[in-house]
Image (cartoon, rainbow, N blue to C red):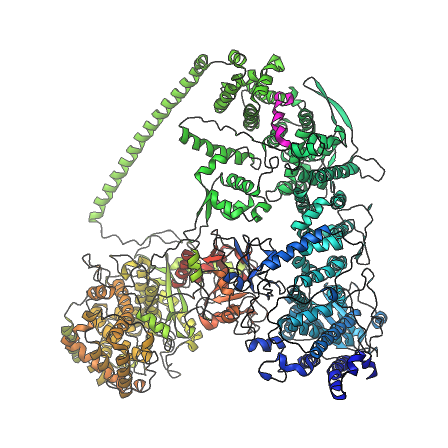
């Protein structure tokens, strides 16, 4: 006890009596004892029980005797393994959220949760909302994006005053003006105070308890004491443990035995028991780790996989524990070889680390728990403990806790935790981040305190992050995002912790590679050199460090600091100076560069990151005074000159060549300019200081004349010249100018020998998204030079740099450019010239929305495009800005996507075209020409002129230093450049008779500039144009006049005229004398016109000749036709042709047998009506009365959907997305056909070629499978596996049109006359169902064509039947478990699927289902079916017929008569009763449609009559099924129809209903109650719904057999419902007429009696399953994709692993959620297939269709192959967003969704996949696609 008494304060011990005192000290000391002795007592083996014990001890010590204050319902203790917050949540303690004005939401996101961002409301990108706050606030028409939290730890910013532009009125987190006021006064105070020299970080004493919190609970002082002591002790335990943990998990060489034993440890006994751990990282795959573990630890792959899972989930795992250290070290070496993180430590320390992880988990649990109603108190106590220094509490730790952190004064526990963060592993790291995040929201003071400690130790955090951390994504460095984006916090730490300058120092030291012992040197050596090939440039991790700097400087209060404090810009300039001119390029003149490095990529990454900071740093000076801005400009210039002009021996000559001047004479004036040859010198793309200078010059409002005068400067020129000479300024601008000249040379192809690297740099530099960070800055520096220096000097410098001084003085031959290069350089020169003279965005400080508008208008002027393409044409800063989409709506129309494959596009509104400038500086030459065409066409229409002139607009620079920019047009150099530009081209054209290269482009540019000049400075420019004479004494006007009517350049005439007219306004006489008038020119034109006329006449003559020839040929053709007709008259009838064979291209006719390519696939598509599901009963009640009319009610299917539609389509309620339950599907074979035909012989050859291809491409994943007999149609690439006979033979026998009763009588007589037929008897099923054994798929007596001698034509048919039988038998053998039929005894015939029902009947049914809800007036369902489909049905029927004839080979009629009689006997009860042996099975238990199919195959002439019988059998069956279903439904829940609608069809429903069931007392009773509760109207409605599909299918079957007899009559009344129309066409007497139909009555009563007496009716499972009568739909996906995530733990949970999958796939057939390509659910026995494949086998047989939620795409599966399909969701801009990369909200696009239904219902999935695989030749498995 004595050691403990020193631990507790004496007064506390004294004040307690003996008993309480024992109790008070006991739990904590017990906790200490347990934790200290645990490693040994548990034999270092950490189990879930250990965790439970630690938690129990922690809670006991924590709450002492006060457990009841925390636990609900007076539980005395927590259940084992549970945590407090779980228990509190489970009893609903958190149900009622606390509403306190001014308190932030602080909801912490879990991994996989959805977060929302609203650009219009948020202050920056880091502000997010949880789905609850988002749903509660109104963001109509805002730019909302949505994403999934990749990790836990972020928190919702709702209610935080500093996160939003305006209040968002969340009802859960109301706004409080006091909070807002408090923050703004805090900022004001911090800005005014001067920071202390050594600022102390805030500790727990500086933080007051939270005020104004209404939910406080009284906390007894002893409880508070025990809470804080337990927490303090627990944190100290963690820190003591981590003291001896290693900093790195990476072992290039594992330690030797000796060093292993000497490693630091907390184990007092120094036991040699070691543990080997593997650590998670972000570069090894699961499979690598599993294989490794399997190899080195002898574990099975399953165990290895579980360990790999744990490594991924926890961040590390113990692989082996042993005292044999040598063996462990050997294993460690093997692991380290593949660069996997591995450590070998003493088991004692490892065990303690695991205990620490539990403690951290417990601390996290406390932040989520409440004490009574108080949700803050526990977090406040935790915070105050973390902000206190460590205590030496460990009994065993001999270390001195006052061990100091070298660079931190009085470190608190929080500092130590931050520092040791990198020693932890994934799970505890994330938990700690979550703890910190939860503390930030307690109060503003807490936020400041945590930020202040974070900032204090920031450089150490960065060291670990950049240099040692193996798992960067969980690094504490990313916590900066939550602190540095808060304005008041960043202001505080910049002011008091100097964080900006420390960050700059880190950047400087890191990139100059000042790194030793895994630490970045601080403070850095300022003279260190930079080398782009060192490690720092290759590191991928430096980007976030720049982002941190950007976040800090972006905050408004920090911008104030930057603007007003000189040291910020000085230090920043110094940092930029390090990066000046890095990685220079030198032109490879004679031979190609040997080795192209890619160092330039990392250099660009670094400097672009830097230039983003430069942009923000520069923008800060908009808050500066004139003096501050001028000082900043001087500072930056000073730094530029210091590095480029100061000569000393340390200077790198490649980066900064010495400055030399030379004198140049141009146009009689001498200029002293810099001497530099771009073709020979070395030039870098990176001039960070000039970019910074450019940003400073952009503040034209601060640099305006008045403020400058007030500060004692005349102008911007005066500002620049006061400290530096003109030569120095020329040096400053020369660097950007060199880059521009180098770019021009690269673009014209003068640097090709430098290889790809130089092109890559150029593309980056000028890229649309990035150019405003670098390229535009260089142009702006030149533009500024025109204002600050004499424009003539600037122009001459440019000419000199571009090496065009000679060309523009008349020398057209160039020493180093050849002709094409020269023309290219001239064009590039004018491009730069136009930009710096006319681009005014920076010169007028154009407001961002205006700039954005201008960019969008120019991007769309070329033509409409999708949003993504548009964004690629605009700078990233503009796209990211909040105004972008608003402006886009203003200037463009959105055209939503309509069909399944198109995307939404934006089209420029008409009035916006007036703002387009074809010479906009972001246009390439081709774009400019396209835009000119567009604008000219518009002007032509508008003005009605043939050749309109696009007049440039005035620049309108009204204030700021750039007001004088237009006066550059008064420059003489410019006029001379114009003169020679035109003159050289004209003289070249006249000399050679052809235009030189690039002439059009150059003339366009010069004329544009001249037009701008006469617009801006008409007088002076006109004067110069007239008075300055050059070559041959000509002046500019002379050249223009010669140009005006030049016959080679007629397209320029209008523009030249316009220019000359403007000059003439000022110099009338001069222009008048020189101008040739067009009258004198008209004679010149004449020969040309004559030429044109002659050409036209020639052309017309040729056309006339051709026409005559065509008529002659056509006439001859007609003759040939006539001859043929005469021949045919007397020859025997030619065979009917069916088109050509797609292999041999010969005609298909009866001379050689052929077939259709078909595909028979197993499926579970047909649905049975589910019983016991109320919703499906209701659906049947509300079925449309015509399924052959379009079902899509024309809803407003506008895209994107209207806001109220989105609001109303709230959450997904059910767990299966209203999908159809899989257990109610019916298995069968579906045949489909691709409409192409082939000779049988060709088919044999083609099949052989497929087998050959499979042998040749052995590793390929082929689209077809040979064991399944598949092939691919050579023409349309559809999948097939059979060839179906095409019926060419005689037409079917004529339909028997006798009246029904007469036919029954005749049939009876013919049966009486014939002898009994034992053969037929023997071929029927023993079960007495009346089915025939030769029609089963696995019939043992079936023989293939090879075994049967037959006539040749019938052998051919037999071959085709074989293909069908082989496939059917295969499927049938594999699917026994899916069929409900009773199989015959072993050795009897008739095993397998029954083909008339399960192949033909199933196929027709599926075709009918696919057509539900489609159609148009005047057509029945049979009219919607295509000819090939009818051909397929006839082919299947002929297969059935052939199977009969094989069984009755030796009868002349091939057994038809016998089977016909058997069918009649089966149907007419008087015959079926006589032979009870054959038909003991009640007819009502069979599917009547199958009997109709049998009839069509054997005796089609009696279809009409059999149809009547089967229809009535179907009605009776429906009654039986209805009784069964309605018995389980409640009538009160079903919709009631107003009155009976179908009395004329069904007559006395009640009577019919009761007579069907009267033979079975149980059934009769059930039917009574059903009738009385549901009533006749409902029953009638259901009878209608359930029997309509039968009529539709019957019509399809009849139309296939007799195309003409069952045609739709033209006079059919369209207003009738479908049922009435079908009954008319099929000629069936409706049920209402039953009383007059005796024969039908007899049949019915016979069937019902047989059923009623059979055992099937005695129980209530009835044996009759009705079919689902409605339109088939897939699972219902929500209208808005993110609604899937709202209650994902309820709606999307994987049934196998009981988790919410990270990558979920939703089965669209049954709505089940499965894990997609995940590790947890895998079929380890079946080639490690994933859960989608596993579920497909259970759900829908061979095909699967899934929506992949996270990837946003569809997955189609068929028999181990698959393909991805495009998502049915599109974002607001009508585009697919794969993997939610852009994160915009997505809406279901109806047309795409319908397309998915179509593919599925038409059984198109196998073919879709086959086509995909056919199109890609992959190396292995579709998974590799």
Q: Is residue 873 left or right of residue 1229?
A: right
Provide residue 774's location: percent of width, then percent of height. Answer: 66, 41
Q: Is residue 1380 left or right of residue 906?
A: left
Provide residue 41's location: percent of width, then percent of height. Answer: 76, 83
**Rendered view: 227 above or below 1294:** below
User: Is residue 1203 at least partly visible in the picture?
Assistant: yes
Q: Is residue 1745 left or right of residue 992?
A: left
Quadrant including the C terminus: bottom right
Provide residue 1625's location: percent of width, then percent of height. Answer: 21, 64
Q: Quadrant of residue 1019?
A: top right
Name the chief secondary structure element in magenta.
Answer: helix
Toward the viewer: 827 or 946? 946
**Rendered view: 297 above or below 444:** below
Quadrant including the N terminus: bottom right
Q: Disc count in the image?
A: 0
User: Is residue 1342 at least partly visible in the picture?
Assistant: no
Magenta span has 670?
no
**Rendered view: 552 above or below 57:** above
Provide residue 346's location: percent of width, then percent of height. Answer: 79, 74
Toward the viewer: 1699 or 1300? 1699
Q: Which residues are magenta?
A: 961-975
Toward the viewer: 692 or 15? 15
Magenta span has 967?
yes
């Amino acid at each position: 006890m004595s050691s403990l008494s020193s631990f507790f304060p004496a007064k506390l011990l004294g004040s307690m009596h003996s008993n309480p005192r024992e109790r008070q000290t006991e739990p904590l000391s017990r906790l200490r004892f347990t934790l200290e002795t645990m490693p040994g007592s548990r034999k270092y083996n950490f189990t879930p029980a250990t965790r439970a014990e630690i938690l129990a001890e922690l809670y006991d010590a924590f709450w002492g005797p006060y457990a009841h204050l925390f636990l609900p319902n007076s539980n005395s203790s927590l259940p084992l393994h549970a945590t407090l917050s779980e228990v509190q949540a489970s009893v609903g303690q958190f149900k009622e959220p606390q509403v306190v004005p001014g308190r932030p939401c602080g909801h912490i996101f879990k991994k996989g949760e959805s977060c929302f961002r609203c650009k219009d409301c948020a202050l920056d990108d880091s502000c997010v909302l949880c789905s609850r706050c988002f749903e509660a606030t109104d963001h109509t028409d805002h730019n909302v994006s949505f994403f999934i939290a990749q990790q836990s730890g972020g928190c919702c910013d709702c209610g935080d005053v500093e996160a939003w532009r305006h209040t968002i009125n969340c009802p859960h987190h109301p706004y409080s003006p006091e909070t807002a006021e408090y923050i703004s006064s805090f900022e004001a105070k911090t800005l005014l105070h001067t920071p202390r020299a050594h600022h102390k970080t805030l500790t727990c004493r500086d933080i007051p308890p939270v005020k104004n919190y209404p939910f406080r609970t009284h906390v007894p002082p002893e409880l508070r004491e025990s809470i804080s002591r337990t927490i303090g002790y627990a944190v100290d335990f963690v820190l003591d443990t981590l003291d001896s943990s290693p900093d790195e998990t990476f072992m290039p060489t594992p330690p030797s035995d000796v060093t292993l034993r000497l490693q630091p440890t907390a184990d007092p006994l120094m036991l040699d028991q070691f543990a080997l751990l593997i650590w998670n990282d972000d570069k090894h795959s699961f499979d690598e780790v599993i294989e490794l573990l399997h190899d080195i630890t002898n574990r099975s792959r399953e165990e290895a996989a579980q360990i790999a899972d744990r490594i991924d989930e926890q961040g590390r795992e113990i692989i082996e524990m042993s005292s044999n250290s040598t063996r462990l070290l050997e294993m460690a070496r093997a692991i380290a070889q593949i660069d996997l993180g591995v450590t070998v430590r003493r088991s004692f320390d490892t065990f303690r680390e695991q205990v620490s992880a539990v403690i951290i988990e417990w601390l996290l649990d406390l932040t989520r728990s409440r004490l009574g109603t108080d949700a803050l108190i526990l977090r406040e106590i935790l915070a105050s403990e973390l902000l206190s220094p460590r205590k030496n509490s460990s009994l065993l730790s001999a270390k001195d806790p006052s061990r100091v952190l070298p660079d931190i004064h009085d470190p608190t526990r929080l500092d130590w935790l931050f520092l040791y963060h990198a020693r932890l592993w994934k799970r505890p790291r994330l938990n700690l981040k979550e703890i910190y995040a939860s503390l930030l929201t307690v109060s503003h003071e807490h936020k400041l305190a945590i930020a202040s400690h974070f900032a204090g130790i920031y450089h150490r955090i960065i060291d670990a992050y950049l240099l040692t951390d193996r798992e960067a994504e969980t690094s504490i460095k990313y916590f900066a995002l939550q602190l540095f984006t808060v304005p008041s916090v960043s202001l505080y730490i910049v002011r008091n912790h100097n964080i900006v300058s420390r960050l700059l120092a880190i950047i400087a030291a890191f990139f100059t590679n000042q790194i030793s012992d895994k630490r970045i040197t601080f403070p850095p050596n300022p003279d260190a050199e930079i080398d782009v090939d060192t490690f720092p440039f290759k590191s991928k991790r430096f980007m976030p460090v720049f982002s941190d700097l950007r976040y800090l400087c972006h905050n408004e209060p920090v911008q104030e600091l930057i603007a007003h404090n000189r040291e910020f810009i000085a230090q920043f300039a110094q940092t930029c100076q390090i990066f000046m001119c890095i990685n220079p390029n030198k032109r490879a003149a004679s031979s190609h560069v040997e080795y192209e490095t890619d160092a330039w990529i990392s250099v660009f990454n670094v400097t672009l990151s830097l230039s983003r900071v430069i942009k923000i740093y520069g923008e800060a000076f908009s808050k500066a005074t004139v003096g501050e801005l001028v000082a900043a400009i001087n500072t930056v210039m000073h730094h530029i000159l210091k590095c480029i002009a100061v000569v000393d021996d340390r200077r790198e000559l490649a980066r900064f060549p010495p400055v030399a001047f030379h004198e140049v004479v141009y146009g009689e004036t001498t200029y002293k300019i810099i001497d530099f040859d771009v073709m020979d010198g070395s030039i870098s793309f990176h001039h960070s200081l000039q970019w910074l200078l450019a940003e400073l010059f952009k503040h034209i409002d601060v640099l305006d004349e008045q403020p400058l005068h007030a500060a004692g400067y005349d102008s911007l020129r005066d500002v620049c010249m006061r400290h530096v000479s003109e030569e120095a300024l020329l040096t400053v601008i020369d660097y950007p100018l060199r880059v521009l000249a180098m770019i021009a040379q690269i673009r014209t192809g003068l640097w090709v020998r430098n290889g790809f690297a130089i092109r890559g740099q150029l593309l980056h530099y000028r890229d649309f998204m990035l150019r405003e960070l670098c390229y535009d800055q260089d142009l702006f520096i030149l533009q500024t030079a025109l204002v600050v220096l004499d424009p003539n000097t600037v122009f001459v410098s440019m000419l000199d740099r571009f090496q065009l001084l000679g060309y523009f003085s008349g020398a057209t031959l160039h020493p180093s450019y050849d002709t094409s290069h020269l023309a290219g350089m001239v064009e590039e020169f004018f491009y730069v010239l136009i930009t710096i003279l006319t681009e005014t965005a920076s010169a007028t400080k154009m407001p961002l929305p205006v700039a954005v508008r201008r960019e969008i208008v120019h991007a769309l002027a070329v033509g409409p495009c999708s949003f993504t393409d548009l964004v690629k044409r605009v700078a990233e800063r503009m796209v990211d800005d909040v105004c972008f989409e608003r402006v886009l709506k203003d200037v463009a129309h959105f055209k939503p996507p309509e069909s399944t494959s198109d995307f939404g596009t934006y089209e420029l509104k008409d009035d916006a075209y007036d703002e387009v400038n074809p010479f906009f500086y972001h246009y390439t030459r081709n774009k400019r020409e396209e835009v000119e065409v567009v604008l000219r066409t518009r002007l032509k229409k508008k003005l009605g002129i043939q050749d309109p002139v696009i007049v440039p607009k005035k620049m309108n620079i009204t204030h700021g230093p750039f007001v004088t920019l237009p006066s550059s047009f008064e420059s003489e150099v410019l006029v001379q450049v114009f003169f020679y530009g035109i003159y050289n081209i004209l003289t070249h054209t006249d000399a050679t008779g052809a235009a030189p290269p690039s002439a059009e482009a150059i003339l366009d540019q010069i004329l544009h500039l001249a037009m701008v000049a006469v617009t801006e400075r008409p007088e002076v420019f006109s004067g110069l144009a007239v008075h300055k004479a050059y070559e041959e004494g000509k002046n500019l006007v002379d050249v223009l006049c010669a140009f005006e009517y030049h016959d080679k350049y007629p397209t320029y005439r209008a523009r030249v005229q316009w220019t000359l007219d403007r000059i003439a306004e000022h110099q009338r006489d001069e222009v008048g004398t020189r101008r040739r008038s067009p009258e004198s020119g008209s004679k010149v034109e004449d020969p040309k016109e004559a030429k044109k006329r002659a050409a036209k006449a020639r052309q017309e003559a040729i056309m006339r000749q051709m026409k005559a020839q065509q008529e002659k040929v056509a006439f001859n053709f007609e003759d040939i036709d006539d001859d043929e007709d005469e021949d045919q008259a007397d020859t025997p009838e030619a065979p009917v042709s069916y088109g050509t064979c797609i292999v041999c291209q010969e005609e298909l006719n009866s001379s050689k047998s052929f077939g259709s390519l078909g595909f028979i696939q197993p499926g579970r598509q047909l649905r049975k009506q589910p019983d016991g599901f109320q919703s499906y009963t209701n659906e049947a009640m509300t079925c449309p009365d015509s399924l052959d009319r379009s079902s899509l009610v024309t809803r407003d299917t506008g895209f994107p959907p209207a806001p109220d539609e989105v609001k109303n389509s709230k959450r997904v309620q059910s767990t299966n997305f209203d999908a159809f339950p899989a257990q109610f599907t019916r298995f069968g074979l579906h045949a489909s056909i691709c409409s192409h035909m082939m000779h049988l012989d060709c088919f044999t050859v083609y099949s052989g070629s497929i087998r050959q291809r499979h042998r040749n491409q052995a590793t390929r994943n082929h689209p077809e499978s040979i064991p399944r007999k598949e092939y691919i149609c050579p023409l349309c690439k559809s999948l097939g596996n059979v060839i179906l006979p095409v019926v060419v033979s005689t037409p079917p026998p004529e339909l028997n049109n006798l009246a029904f009763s007469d036919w029954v009588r005749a049939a009876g007589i013919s049966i009486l006359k014939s002898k009994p037929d034992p053969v037929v008897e023997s071929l029927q099923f023993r079960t007495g169902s009346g089915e025939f054994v030769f029609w089963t798929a696995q019939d043992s007596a079936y023989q293939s064509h090879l075994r049967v001698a037959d006539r040749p034509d019938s052998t051919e048919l037999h071959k085709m039947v074989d293909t069908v039988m082989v496939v059917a038998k295969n499927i049938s053998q594999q699917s026994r478990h899916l069929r409900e039929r009773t199989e015959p005894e072993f050795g009897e015939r008739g095993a397998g699927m029954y083909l008339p029902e399960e192949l033909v009947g199933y196929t027709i049914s599926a075709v009918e289902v696919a057509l539900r809800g489609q159609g148009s007036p005047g057509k029945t369902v049979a009219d919607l079916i295509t000819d090939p489909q009818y051909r397929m049905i006839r082919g299947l029927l002929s297969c059935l017929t052939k199977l009969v004839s094989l069984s009755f080979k030796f009868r002349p009629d091939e057994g038809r008569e016998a089977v016909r009689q058997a069918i009649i006997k089966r149907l007419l009860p008087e015959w079926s009763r006589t032979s009870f042996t054959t038909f003991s099975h009640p007819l009502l238990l069979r599917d009547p449609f199958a009997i109709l199919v049998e009839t069509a195959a054997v005796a089609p002439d009696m279809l009409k009559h059999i149809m009547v019988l089967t229809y009535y059998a179907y009605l009776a069956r429906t009654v039986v099924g209805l009784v069964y279903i309605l018995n389980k439904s409640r009538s009160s829940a079903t919709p009631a129809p107003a009155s009976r609608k179908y009395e004329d069809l069904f007559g006395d429903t009640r009577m019919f209903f009761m007579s069907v069931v009267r033979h079975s007392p149980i059934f009769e009773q059930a039917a009574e109650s059903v009738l009385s509760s549901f009533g006749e109207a409902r029953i009638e409605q259901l009878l209608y719904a359930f029997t309509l599909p039968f009529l539709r299918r019957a019509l399809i079957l009849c139309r296939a057999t007799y195309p003409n007899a069952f045609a739709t009559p033209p006079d059919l009344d369209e207003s009738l419902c479908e049922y009435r129309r079908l009954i008319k066409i099929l000629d069936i007497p409706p049920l209402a007429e039953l009383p007059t139909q005796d024969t039908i009555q007899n049949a019915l009563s016979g069937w019902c009696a047989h059923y009623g007496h059979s055992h099937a009716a005695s129980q209530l499972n009835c044996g009759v399953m009705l079919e689902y009568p409605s339109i088939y739909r897939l699972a219902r996906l929500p209208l808005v994709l993110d609604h899937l995530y709202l209650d994902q733990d309820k709606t999307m949970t994987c049934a196998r692993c009981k988790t919410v999958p990270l990558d979920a796939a939703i089965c669209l057939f049954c709505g089940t959620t499965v894990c997609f390509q995940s590790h947890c659910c895998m079929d380890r026995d079946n080639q490690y297939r994933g859960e989608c494949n596993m579920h497909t086998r259970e759900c829908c047989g061979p095909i699967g269709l899934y929506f992949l939620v996270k990837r946003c795409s569809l997955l189609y599966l068929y028999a181990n192959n698959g393909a991805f399909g495009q998502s049915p969701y599109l974002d607001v801009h009508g585009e697919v967003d794969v993997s939610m990369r852009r994160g915009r909200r997505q809406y279901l696009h109806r047309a795409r969704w319908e397309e998915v239904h179509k593919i599925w219902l038409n059984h198109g999935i196998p073919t879709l996949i086959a086509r995909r695989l056919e199109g890609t030749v992959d190396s292995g498995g579709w998974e590799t696609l």
